[in-house]
Image (cartoon, rainbow, N blue to C red):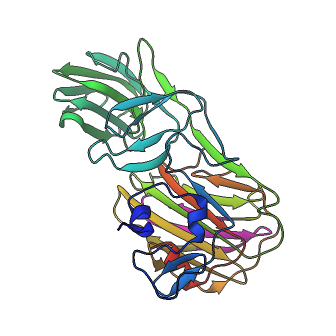
Amino acid sequence: MVGRRALLLAGAAVPVSAYAQCVTDTHAVDSCRGGIRNGAVVAPSPSLALDFTVPGTMPPNVVFTRASVGTYFDIAGAMQTATTNTPRWTYDPVTHALQGMLMETARTNLLLNSATLGTQSATVTAAATTLSFYGTGSIAYSGVATGTLVGAGAFPQRASVTFTPTAGTLTLTVTGSVLNAQLETGSFASSWIPTTGATAARAIEHCSLTDAVMFGGTTDRTVAVDAYARQVAPSGSNEIWLLLSDGTLTNFMKMLSPQLASNVRGQITVAGVSKLNGGDRSYGAPPTAFKAALANGAIWNGAVNGVLMVGSGGVSQQLGPLTQLNIGEGNSGPVQIDGAIQRVRYWNTALSAAQLQAVTT
């Protein structure tokens, strides 16, 4: 018999109502009376549960936008293209495991006719730049930077290299099979952006839910996210996994990964006064799935993959009425994740330290 916990860990779709049931792989004489159980600890059912593990189905009232097409891998490992403003549920192209709803920052592919690349030149800036492609061929680049990128093998293996050129013209000389190639400003390779006779951009993605009733009042709160990190946060940018706020930078609670770190950090600000900016706890070595949760009231507690955030139990303060839940992004500027969202949960109460460990295990 396959238990609910096993299904959850495998990424199976579980209806919201299931969160009110006992999540365990073993039968207990005293059955779970609602909530989420881990061992002897039972967390109450969430006030809100958003499931992003059902491809093609967005949770009710969640607004998603992306002002361009975007590519992703389907369950068979084939690359597909999502139309404008359509979410991308992406899979690992090798294991075919669902990673979740893909969220990425804006990028531009500087190569022309990139599906089957030919020798060409591109204008680059003096910033971290990543070249990538699928195939068994090679690309020798010269001019403002010099090197050779050799193919990683048969599709879906992808070769990539990151370098910092001087500003100017980069010449790319192609040998053999070079498919779905990309040259982009950034410290890692993002999803392929198709191009023909001109460069092309993939727009930033936005995902949010606004509910002044659900998030209203002056009260204790808990937020939790199950996600998939594809790489550490890049230099100069935090990756915001979840942000609950009043739409300003004055009142909020959030979970983020700081630049160049595979950690989850908590931040809580009440009436413009920071109550928490830290608690960093590693989520593991990316690419990897993880779970994180943050609770706030008179004290704060947080947990990542069942381990409490550093300093949990610190003094905090209840937040007043909030309105907006930003998923995989902040509420000002292009500060967001380059990864995937699986589930988001919210409680109108502050879960205990033990309960946070339970819901993130």
Looking at the image, can residue 257 be seen?
no
Q: Residue at x 48, y 57 (%)?
A: 227
| Along the viewing direction, whichever of 343 and 206 lies nearer the viewer | 343
Q: Position of residue 73 (x, y in %)?
A: 37, 37
Residue 238 falls left or right of residue 142: right
Q: Is residue 155 above or below residue 327?
A: above
Q: Position of residue 54 (x, y in %)?
A: 50, 47
Tell me the magenta residue range: 253-277
Q: Residue at x 69, y 56 (%)?
A: 325
Count of labels in the image: 0
Q: Locate the C terminus by quadrant.
A: bottom left
Q: Does the segment drawn in magenta span residue 308?
A: no
| Along the viewing direction, whichever of 120 and 295 lies nearer the viewer | 295
Q: Does the segment drawn in magenta span residue 276?
A: yes
Residue 115 falls left or right of residue 5: left
Dominant SS type (magenta): strand
Q: Residue at x 44, y 72 (%)?
A: 305
Looking at the image, can residue 273 be seen?
yes
Residue furthest toward the top? 197
Q: Residue at x 21, y 26 (%)?
A: 139
Q: Position of residue 332 (x, y in %)?
A: 68, 48
Q: Position of residue 196 (x, y in %)?
A: 41, 14
Q: Is residue 99 above or below residue 198?
A: below
Residue 299 falls left or right of residue 309: right
Q: Locate the N terminus by quadrant.
A: bottom left
Query: Would you identify the image quadrant in which residue 290 lies?
Result: bottom left
